[in-house]
Each structure stands twice: as structure tokens, then as C-alpha cells.
């Protein structure tokens, strides 16, 4: 059944959206089993991953990266601060903004979690390297197309719809 479903090209948007959602949920579930060993949620993993570059990121960028509304992100970052994994500092370029960065303990935790997730992904080997590269390219193209489409759903419109419970 899996082979026939993959061989068949989705012809309707809801079919493609269903396939994307299924793949994301199953992938996140698989990764969540590893993250649970570290007491880390998928959302926290995304935040730590973004902050692992050491640059410091404003809360809007962190919220976008973690796919979280601002109030939820604030609670998550508060918890990461309490766990001494993240610290906040004033943005020197705009003193009204706050930047989040990993603490040394946060960087160490990110490295441990990242190694474990990569090992699980490699062991499961859900895609051949060439397929993974092709999928990454296609998904990036799809995301970019929706972001760049003026008449498409903007992040702001999507956020408002989520807040209204749609």
C-alpha cells in the first residue's frame, strides 16, 4: 500500500497537505522519542537548534523558527532560562529588543541532543541521501513559493486564523 500511495502523484492540494502533515508528524514522533530522554520537547529542540549558531536571535525570529505564537514562545524561553540553557540580553542594535542566546550549558545540551537525534535519524535511514537532498530542495521551494505569493496566505493571516481557532 505504501508503494502505491507513493507512486501516485497527489492531484488535489488536500492530498499533498495530508502527505506533508503525515510525514512531519511521524518524523516528529520518532525524534520525540529521542528528545524525551533529554527532557526536551520538539519546540525546545527547534529553539536550541536556532540559538546554537551563537549569534543571538530576537524573539520574533525564534518564534518563527519554532512555529510558536509569541506567548507560547515566551513561556518556553522562560523555562529554558530557568534551566540555565538560554539567557536573554538587550540587542545592542535596538535596545528595545531582546536577544536569546545559549548558555554554555545550553550549548552542551544542544550538542548532546543533536548527536542523539542525528544518530536516530541515521539508524532509521528514512531516505537515501539523494532523496533527502531532493526533498529538502522541494520543501524549501514550496515554502518559499507560499511566502513570496502576495495573494497567498501570509504568516500574519495564518496566525490570526489559528488564534480564532480555525
Image: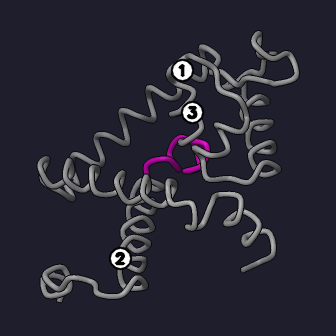
From this view, report whether residue 85 is shown above or below residue 62.
above
From this view, report whether residue 84 is shown above or below residue 137.
above
Q: Nearer the viewer, residue 62 or 1?
A: 62
Mark 3 Cα shell of 10 Å, populated few (<14), some (14-19), many (≥20): many
- Label 3 and label 2: CA atoms lie apart by 27 Å
* 78 to the left or right of 19: right
> Which label lies toward us, 3 or 2?
2
Q: Which residue in the protein does label 2 denote?
A: 19
Percent position of residue 15, x then y: 36, 85
Q: Which residues are magenta?
A: 34-45
> Which label lies toward us, 2 or 1?
2
* 101 to the left or right of 139: right
| Residue 107 disc label | 1
Which quarter of the figure has residue 112?
Answer: top left
Q: Which residue in the protein does label 3 denote?
A: 48
Mark 2 Cα shell of 10 Å, populated few (<14), some (14-19), many (≥20): some
Where disc 3 sits, the SS reads: helix
From this view, report whether residue 25 is shown above or below residue 132.
below
From this view, report whether residue 147 is shown above or below residue 23.
above
Q: Residue at x 66, y 25 (%)?
A: 85
Q: Is residue 42 magenta?
A: yes
Q: Residue at x 73, y 30 (%)?
A: 83
- Label 2 and label 1: CA atoms lie apart by 34 Å
Assess whether mark 2 and mark 3 are in contact (beta carbons under 8 angstroms): no
Which quarter of the figure has residue 60?
Answer: top right
Where disc 2 sits, the SS reads: helix
Question: Which residue lies most toward the front here?
Answer: 150
Assess whether mark 1 and mark 3 are in contact (beta carbons under 8 angstroms): no
Mark 1 Cα shell of 10 Å, populated few (<14), some (14-19), many (≥20): many
- Label 3 and label 1: CA atoms lie apart by 8 Å
Where disc 1 sits, the SS reads: helix
Amino acid at each position: 500500500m505504501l508503494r502505491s500511495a507513493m507512486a501516485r502523484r497527489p492531484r488535489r492540494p488536500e492530498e499533498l497537505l495530508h502527505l506533508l502533515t503525515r510525514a512531519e508528524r511521524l518524523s516528529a514522533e520518532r525524534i520525540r522519542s529521542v528528545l524525551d530522554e533529554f527532557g526536551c520537547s520538539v519546540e525546545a529542540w527547534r529553539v536550541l537548534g536556532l540559538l546554537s549558531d551563537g549569534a543571538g536571535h530576537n524573539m520574533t525570529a525564534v518564534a518563527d523558527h519554532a512555529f510558536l505564537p509569541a506567548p507560547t514562545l515566551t513561556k518556553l524561553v522562560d523555562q529554558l532560562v530557568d534551566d540555565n540553557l538560554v539567557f536573554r540580553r538587550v540587542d545592542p542594535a535596538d535596545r528595545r529588543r531582546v536577544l536569546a542566546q545559549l548558555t554554555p550549558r545550553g550549548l552542551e545540551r544542544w550538542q548532546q541532543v543533536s548527536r542523539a537525534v542525528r544518530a536516530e535519524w541515521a539508524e532509521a535511514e528514512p531516505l537515501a541521501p539523494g532523496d533527502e537532498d531532493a526533498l529538502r530542495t522541494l520543501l524549501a521551494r514550496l515554502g518559499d513559493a507560499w511566502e513570496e505569493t502576495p495573494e497567498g496566505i501570509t504568516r500574519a493571516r495564518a496566525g490570526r486564523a489559528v488564534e480564532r481557532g480555525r
